[in-house]
Image (cartoon, coloured by chain):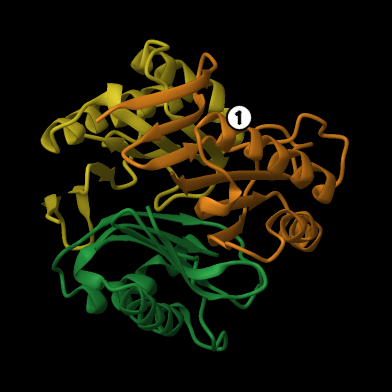
Chain colours: A yellow, B orange, C green
Amino acid sequence: MTIKRHEPSKIYSKVVEANGFVFTAGVVADDVSKDARGQAQQILGEIDRLLKLAGTDKTKVVSATIWVTDIRHRDLMNEAWNAWTGGENLPGRACIEAKLADPRMLVEIAVVAAK
Amino acid sequence: MTIKRHEPSKIYSKVVEANGFVFTAGVVADDVSKDARGQAQQILGEIDRLLKLAGTDKTKVVSATIWVTDIRHRDLMNEAWNAWTGGENLPGRACIEAKLADPRMLVEIAVVAAK
Amino acid sequence: MTIKRHEPSKIYSKVVEANGFVFTAGVVADDVSKDARGQAQQILGEIDRLLKLAGTDKTKVVSATIWVTDIRHRDLMNEAWNAWTGGENLPGRACIEAKLADPRMLVEIAVVAAK
């Protein structure tokens, strides 16, 4: 069993590989001035990058957890989500409301992928 | 490595198999007029169906995440939970409060099972 | 495939092993009179104990989910977190705000480890 950790900060690793699975951290947007769609677009782009670092990609995501700071942001977030998935290789998903580390953050997404 | 996705909607798959594990989406009740116990009963029945689709069952659940819209719904939800588990083959579990996609939804449950 | 469940209560198992992974329940502090740092210290000590029961340890954690009842508790919780990790072998992590089972509980942590 080997664990590979990518881009550790002081607190967490951005993505970790072990035993045929890849776990991303909860990803938030860099530019928190954007709306929920724009933040989700940024987040999903970053998730693409993290999955690639770990040797997998969005077609192999098996589970996603999405936190939105107001459940009414769900529709805008879903526009970015649906553009990202293209309606294919869809993971299991839960989308719930939660406050995040900074009030300007509207969306946070963590995924588990197979590889 | 093979990923099997069951019952994809436009947004997510209801249950996904990969590498010896099965991941359900967050499941909510069809009949949101029921109380937290009734909604949890419906959800756990649906989870039985999804686990069967993916070739496993409730005796192999390893982890469950339960969101309730008011933490005071926990006791009613637990009545349905305890009836479902029968006190056997209990997974790890976290139960936290969160608003869900529709204010009438009182409970959402996602599980990970082995197979 | 074998599943090992450790320390089942009436509702959940404290830690479960399957297919090379270990899943803890959401762990809360025994002494809820402590602040967020003290509660997180207790929780992480208990997680050490649970991981050992399941044949692994904190150097093999791949993913952590942390719920705090007020996102402003995050800094105090992180002090305990950083002392626990020592800045090494960092998992993916998401930290979000959620109400927990008892209003005196300030922090809840669940982890997934490889073994």
Question: In the image shown, does C27 or B5 lie closer to the viewer?
Answer: B5
Q: Name the subunit of mark 1.
A: A
Residue ranking furthest to the front: C1
* Residue B104 locus on image (x, y percent): 79, 36
* Among the 4 quarters of the image, the one containing residue C2: bottom left
Is residue A105 in view from this perspective? no
How many marks are shown on the rendered structure? 1
**The N terminus of chain A - image quarter:** bottom left
* Among the 4 quarters of the image, the one containing residue C3: bottom left
Q: Residue at x 41, y 33 (%)?
A: B17
Q: Is residue A45 left or right of residue B4?
A: left
Q: Residue at x 17, y 62 (%)?
A: A10
On screen, residue B15 above or below C10: above
Q: Residue at x 71, y 32 (%)?
A: B102
On screen, residue A49 above or below A112: above
Q: Is residue B78 left or right of residue C45?
A: right
Is residue C84 in view from this perspective? yes
Q: Residue at x 21, y 64 (%)?
A: C60
Q: Is residue C25 left or right of residue C95?
A: right
Question: In the image shown, does A66 or B13 lie closer to the viewer?
Answer: B13
Q: Name the kind of residue labelled 1 in the image.
A: Arg
* Residue C93 locus on image (x, y percent): 32, 55
**SS under mark 1:** helix
**The C terminus of chain A - image quarter:** top left
On screen, residue B84 above or below B26: below
* Residue B69 locus on image (x, y percent): 70, 49
Question: In the image shown, does C17 or C79 lie closer to the viewer?
Answer: C17
Mark 1 surroundings: few (<14), some (14-19) or many (≥20) residues within 10 A: some
Q: Which residue is mark 1?
A: A72
* Residue C6 locus on image (x, y percent): 47, 74
